[in-house]
Image (cartoon, rainbow, N blue to C red):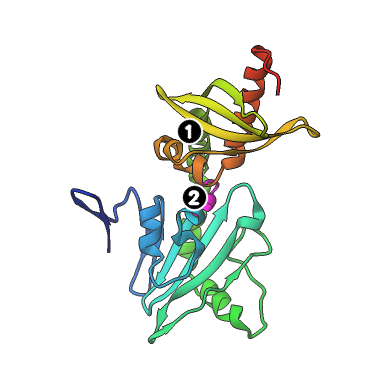
Amino acid sequence: MKIVKKFESFILEFKETEKNTPVLYKDNNLEVKVVKTFDACAEQGKDTKWCSNTKYGYYIHNKTANMYRFNFNDGYKLRLTWDYINSRKTHWGQGGIVNGETKPYIFILPKDDTEPFLFDYKRNDQQQELVDRIESIPQEVIDLVHDYQLNHSIEKSEGLNKMYNEISKIKVIDVNKIEGDKTIVVKIEYLDKKFKIETHYDDDRRDFYFFRLSNEFKKNFKNKMGIITDSDTLTDYLKDKTKEFIKKNNISL
Protein backbone atom coordinates (compact mmCIF):
# COMPACT_ATOMS: atom_id res chain seq x y z
CA MET A 1 0.00 0.00 0.00
CA LYS A 2 1.52 3.32 -1.08
CA ILE A 3 0.64 6.99 -1.32
CA VAL A 4 2.84 9.07 -3.58
CA LYS A 5 3.58 12.68 -2.65
CA LYS A 6 4.98 14.86 -5.44
CA PHE A 7 7.31 17.72 -4.59
CA GLU A 8 9.15 20.15 -6.85
CA SER A 9 12.36 18.14 -7.07
CA PHE A 10 11.54 14.65 -5.89
CA ILE A 11 8.79 12.10 -5.29
CA LEU A 12 8.24 10.61 -1.83
CA GLU A 13 6.36 7.34 -1.47
CA PHE A 14 4.38 6.74 1.69
CA LYS A 15 4.80 3.30 3.15
CA GLU A 16 2.89 1.82 6.05
CA THR A 17 5.06 0.96 9.04
CA GLU A 18 4.44 -0.18 12.59
CA LYS A 19 5.06 3.43 13.63
CA ASN A 20 2.45 5.12 11.44
CA THR A 21 0.00 2.21 11.05
CA PRO A 22 0.47 -0.41 13.79
CA VAL A 23 -1.25 -3.75 13.17
CA LEU A 24 -3.29 -4.99 16.13
CA TYR A 25 -4.61 -8.18 14.56
CA LYS A 26 -4.58 -10.16 11.34
CA ASP A 27 -6.12 -13.44 10.17
CA ASN A 28 -7.56 -14.74 6.89
CA ASN A 29 -10.76 -12.72 7.30
CA LEU A 30 -9.88 -9.55 9.17
CA GLU A 31 -7.03 -7.10 9.63
CA VAL A 32 -7.13 -4.39 12.31
CA LYS A 33 -4.87 -1.33 12.26
CA VAL A 34 -4.52 2.04 13.99
CA VAL A 35 -3.82 5.11 11.84
CA LYS A 36 -1.45 7.58 13.47
CA THR A 37 -0.65 10.01 10.62
CA PHE A 38 -2.72 11.71 7.94
CA ASP A 39 -1.01 9.76 5.16
CA ALA A 40 -1.75 6.49 6.96
CA CYS A 41 -5.36 7.57 7.36
CA ALA A 42 -5.67 8.45 3.67
CA GLU A 43 -4.17 5.10 2.69
CA GLN A 44 -6.57 3.18 4.90
CA GLY A 45 -9.46 5.35 3.72
CA LYS A 46 -9.22 4.30 0.08
CA ASP A 47 -12.59 3.20 -1.38
CA THR A 48 -14.45 5.11 1.34
CA LYS A 49 -16.08 8.51 1.72
CA TRP A 50 -14.91 9.04 5.28
CA CYS A 51 -14.39 12.63 6.43
CA SER A 52 -11.05 11.57 7.92
CA ASN A 53 -9.71 11.33 4.35
CA THR A 54 -9.37 15.12 4.55
CA LYS A 55 -6.75 16.81 6.70
CA TYR A 56 -9.36 18.62 8.76
CA GLY A 57 -11.31 15.42 9.34
CA TYR A 58 -8.19 13.54 10.35
CA TYR A 59 -6.79 16.13 12.75
CA ILE A 60 -10.12 16.99 14.39
CA HIS A 61 -10.63 13.34 15.31
CA ASN A 62 -7.04 12.30 15.97
CA LYS A 63 -6.59 15.12 18.47
CA THR A 64 -8.47 13.25 21.22
CA ALA A 65 -9.32 9.84 19.71
CA ASN A 66 -7.69 6.67 18.48
CA MET A 67 -8.67 5.80 14.92
CA TYR A 68 -9.09 2.07 14.31
CA ARG A 69 -9.46 0.48 10.87
CA PHE A 70 -11.06 -2.93 10.33
CA ASN A 71 -10.41 -4.37 6.86
CA PHE A 72 -12.40 -7.48 5.94
CA ASN A 73 -11.18 -9.96 3.35
CA ASP A 74 -14.19 -9.33 1.08
CA GLY A 75 -13.35 -5.59 0.76
CA TYR A 76 -15.71 -4.30 3.45
CA LYS A 77 -14.21 -1.65 5.73
CA LEU A 78 -15.12 -0.43 9.20
CA ARG A 79 -13.64 2.46 11.08
CA LEU A 80 -13.98 3.15 14.79
CA THR A 81 -13.18 6.60 16.11
CA TRP A 82 -12.91 6.09 19.87
CA ASP A 83 -12.66 9.42 21.66
CA TYR A 84 -11.20 9.87 25.13
CA ILE A 85 -13.00 13.12 25.94
CA ASN A 86 -16.20 13.63 23.94
CA SER A 87 -18.52 10.62 24.01
CA ARG A 88 -20.53 12.02 21.08
CA LYS A 89 -17.43 11.75 18.89
CA THR A 90 -17.06 8.00 19.41
CA HIS A 91 -18.64 6.41 16.37
CA TRP A 92 -18.39 3.75 13.67
CA GLY A 93 -18.48 4.15 9.90
CA GLN A 94 -18.52 1.81 6.93
CA GLY A 95 -16.92 1.85 3.49
CA GLY A 96 -15.12 -0.33 0.99
CA ILE A 97 -16.07 -2.23 -2.15
CA VAL A 98 -17.80 -5.63 -1.87
CA ASN A 99 -18.57 -7.68 -5.00
CA GLY A 100 -18.04 -4.58 -7.13
CA GLU A 101 -20.47 -2.49 -5.06
CA THR A 102 -19.17 0.63 -3.32
CA LYS A 103 -20.58 0.77 0.17
CA PRO A 104 -22.27 4.08 1.04
CA TYR A 105 -20.95 6.03 3.98
CA ILE A 106 -23.13 5.13 6.95
CA PHE A 107 -22.24 5.78 10.57
CA ILE A 108 -23.61 4.85 13.97
CA LEU A 109 -22.91 5.89 17.57
CA PRO A 110 -22.78 3.29 20.35
CA LYS A 111 -25.05 3.79 23.34
CA ASP A 112 -22.09 3.38 25.67
CA ASP A 113 -18.83 4.92 24.45
CA THR A 114 -16.87 2.83 26.98
CA GLU A 115 -18.15 -0.33 25.25
CA PRO A 116 -18.39 0.67 21.57
CA PHE A 117 -18.66 -2.94 20.37
CA LEU A 118 -21.96 -3.57 22.19
CA PHE A 119 -25.18 -2.99 20.24
CA ASP A 120 -28.80 -3.98 20.63
CA TYR A 121 -29.95 -3.11 17.13
CA LYS A 122 -32.59 -4.98 15.09
CA ARG A 123 -34.12 -2.63 12.53
CA ASN A 124 -33.23 -4.19 9.19
CA ASP A 125 -32.23 -0.82 7.72
CA GLN A 126 -29.00 0.54 6.18
CA GLN A 127 -27.26 0.59 9.54
CA GLN A 128 -28.05 -3.08 10.14
CA GLU A 129 -25.19 -4.33 7.96
CA LEU A 130 -22.86 -1.98 9.80
CA VAL A 131 -23.97 -3.36 13.17
CA ASP A 132 -23.83 -6.96 11.90
CA ARG A 133 -20.21 -6.46 10.86
CA ILE A 134 -19.34 -4.94 14.23
CA GLU A 135 -20.95 -7.89 15.99
CA SER A 136 -18.94 -10.31 13.83
CA ILE A 137 -15.65 -9.03 15.24
CA PRO A 138 -14.03 -11.77 17.37
CA GLN A 139 -13.73 -11.25 21.12
CA GLU A 140 -9.95 -11.55 20.80
CA VAL A 141 -9.94 -8.47 18.59
CA ILE A 142 -12.28 -6.56 20.92
CA ASP A 143 -9.92 -7.26 23.82
CA LEU A 144 -6.91 -6.06 21.82
CA VAL A 145 -8.65 -2.80 20.89
CA HIS A 146 -9.72 -2.24 24.51
CA ASP A 147 -6.13 -2.80 25.67
CA TYR A 148 -4.79 -0.37 23.10
CA GLN A 149 -7.34 2.27 24.08
CA LEU A 150 -6.49 1.82 27.76
CA ASN A 151 -2.73 2.06 27.26
CA HIS A 152 -2.41 4.94 24.79
CA SER A 153 -4.28 7.87 26.33
CA ILE A 154 -0.98 9.53 27.26
CA GLU A 155 -0.20 9.97 23.55
CA LYS A 156 -3.20 12.26 23.18
CA SER A 157 -2.20 14.26 26.26
CA GLU A 158 1.30 14.64 24.87
CA GLY A 159 -0.11 15.75 21.52
CA LEU A 160 -2.24 18.45 23.13
CA ASN A 161 0.69 19.61 25.27
CA LYS A 162 2.88 19.91 22.17
CA MET A 163 0.21 22.03 20.53
CA TYR A 164 -0.13 24.34 23.56
CA ASN A 165 3.66 24.61 23.84
CA GLU A 166 3.99 25.61 20.18
CA ILE A 167 1.24 28.21 20.49
CA SER A 168 2.99 29.71 23.53
CA LYS A 169 6.03 30.53 21.35
CA ILE A 170 4.03 33.27 19.60
CA LYS A 171 4.77 36.81 20.83
CA VAL A 172 2.76 39.94 20.07
CA ILE A 173 5.24 42.73 19.22
CA ASP A 174 3.01 45.51 17.88
CA VAL A 175 -0.65 46.50 17.47
CA ASN A 176 -1.91 49.16 15.02
CA LYS A 177 -5.40 50.33 14.13
CA ILE A 178 -6.21 51.15 10.52
CA GLU A 179 -7.70 54.64 10.43
CA GLY A 180 -11.37 54.77 9.43
CA ASP A 181 -11.71 51.01 9.80
CA LYS A 182 -12.33 48.52 12.56
CA THR A 183 -9.42 46.42 11.34
CA ILE A 184 -6.54 45.95 13.76
CA VAL A 185 -3.16 44.80 12.47
CA VAL A 186 -1.30 42.67 15.00
CA LYS A 187 2.37 41.98 14.43
CA ILE A 188 3.65 38.76 15.92
CA GLU A 189 6.98 36.99 16.21
CA TYR A 190 7.32 33.23 15.99
CA LEU A 191 10.61 31.31 15.80
CA ASP A 192 12.51 34.52 14.97
CA LYS A 193 10.18 35.33 12.08
CA LYS A 194 7.71 38.20 11.97
CA PHE A 195 4.16 38.00 10.64
CA LYS A 196 1.13 40.26 10.34
CA ILE A 197 -2.37 39.08 11.24
CA GLU A 198 -5.63 40.99 11.15
CA THR A 199 -8.45 41.18 13.63
CA HIS A 200 -11.53 43.33 14.18
CA TYR A 201 -12.41 45.16 17.37
CA ASP A 202 -16.04 45.40 18.45
CA ASP A 203 -16.57 48.65 20.36
CA ASP A 204 -19.86 47.52 21.87
CA ARG A 205 -18.49 44.23 23.17
CA ARG A 206 -15.07 45.76 23.76
CA ASP A 207 -13.51 42.62 22.39
CA PHE A 208 -11.86 41.11 19.33
CA TYR A 209 -14.06 38.73 17.43
CA PHE A 210 -11.76 36.95 14.98
CA PHE A 211 -8.14 36.70 13.88
CA ARG A 212 -7.28 36.23 10.21
CA LEU A 213 -4.06 34.20 10.04
CA SER A 214 -1.87 34.80 7.00
CA ASN A 215 -1.01 31.91 4.71
CA GLU A 216 2.65 32.58 5.41
CA PHE A 217 2.13 32.09 9.14
CA LYS A 218 0.07 28.94 8.59
CA LYS A 219 2.84 27.55 6.42
CA ASN A 220 5.50 28.24 9.05
CA PHE A 221 3.59 27.18 12.17
CA LYS A 222 5.01 23.83 13.26
CA ASN A 223 1.90 22.26 14.78
CA LYS A 224 -0.67 21.35 12.11
CA MET A 225 -3.27 20.31 14.67
CA GLY A 226 -3.25 23.81 16.15
CA ILE A 227 -3.79 25.43 12.75
CA ILE A 228 -6.25 22.98 11.23
CA THR A 229 -8.49 21.93 14.10
CA ASP A 230 -7.90 24.07 17.15
CA SER A 231 -8.18 27.60 15.82
CA ASP A 232 -10.26 28.55 18.89
CA THR A 233 -7.35 27.80 21.23
CA LEU A 234 -4.97 29.72 18.98
CA THR A 235 -7.42 32.62 18.62
CA ASP A 236 -8.02 32.83 22.39
CA TYR A 237 -4.27 32.91 22.97
CA LEU A 238 -3.77 35.69 20.40
CA LYS A 239 -6.69 37.62 21.85
CA ASP A 240 -5.26 37.46 25.38
CA LYS A 241 -1.74 38.39 24.29
CA THR A 242 -3.03 41.27 22.15
CA LYS A 243 -5.01 42.64 25.09
CA GLU A 244 -1.94 42.36 27.32
CA PHE A 245 0.17 44.26 24.79
CA ILE A 246 -2.46 47.00 24.40
CA LYS A 247 -2.77 47.47 28.15
CA LYS A 248 0.99 47.43 28.76
CA ASN A 249 1.64 50.01 26.02
CA ASN A 250 -1.42 52.22 26.69
CA ILE A 251 -2.76 51.80 23.16
CA SER A 252 -6.20 53.27 22.47
CA LEU A 253 -8.52 51.49 20.03
How many numbered discs, if any? 2
Quadrant position of residue 27 = bottom left
Name the quadrant of the C terminus: top right
Q: Which amino acid type corresponds to the residue marked 2 in the rendered image?
A: Tyr
Disc 1 to disc 2: CB gap under 8 Å? no
In the picture as drawn, the residue positioned furthest to the top comes out as: 249
**Which residue lies under the disc numbered 1?**
162
Taking 38 as reference, is 4 left or right?
Answer: left
Q: Residue 76: x percent and y percent?
A: 43, 76
What is the secondary structure assignment of the residue under circle 2?
Answer: helix
Write the residue at 70% across / 19% down: 252
Camera-side residue: 193 or 21? 193
Could you classify mark 1 by the number of other residues whose Cα lies within 10 Å: few (under 14), some (14-19), or many (20 or more)? Answer: some
The vertical placement of 146 against 93, above or below, is above
Q: Residue 128: x percent and y percent?
A: 60, 80
Taking 91 as reference, is 2 left or right?
Answer: left
Taking 27 as reference, is 62 left or right?
Answer: right
Write the residue at 38% across / 80% down: 74
Q: Residue 37: x percent and y percent?
A: 39, 50
**Which residue lies under the disc numbered 2?**
59
The disc at residue 48 is: none
Q: Which amino acid type corresponds to the residue marked 1 in the rendered image?
A: Lys
In the image, which residues are magenta? 60-66
Write the residue at 38% across / 63% down: 44
What is the secondary structure assignment of the residue under circle 1?
Answer: helix
The vertical placement of 114 against 29, above or below, is above
Between the residue at mark 1 and the residue at mark 2, the CA separation in whole angstroms equals 14 Å
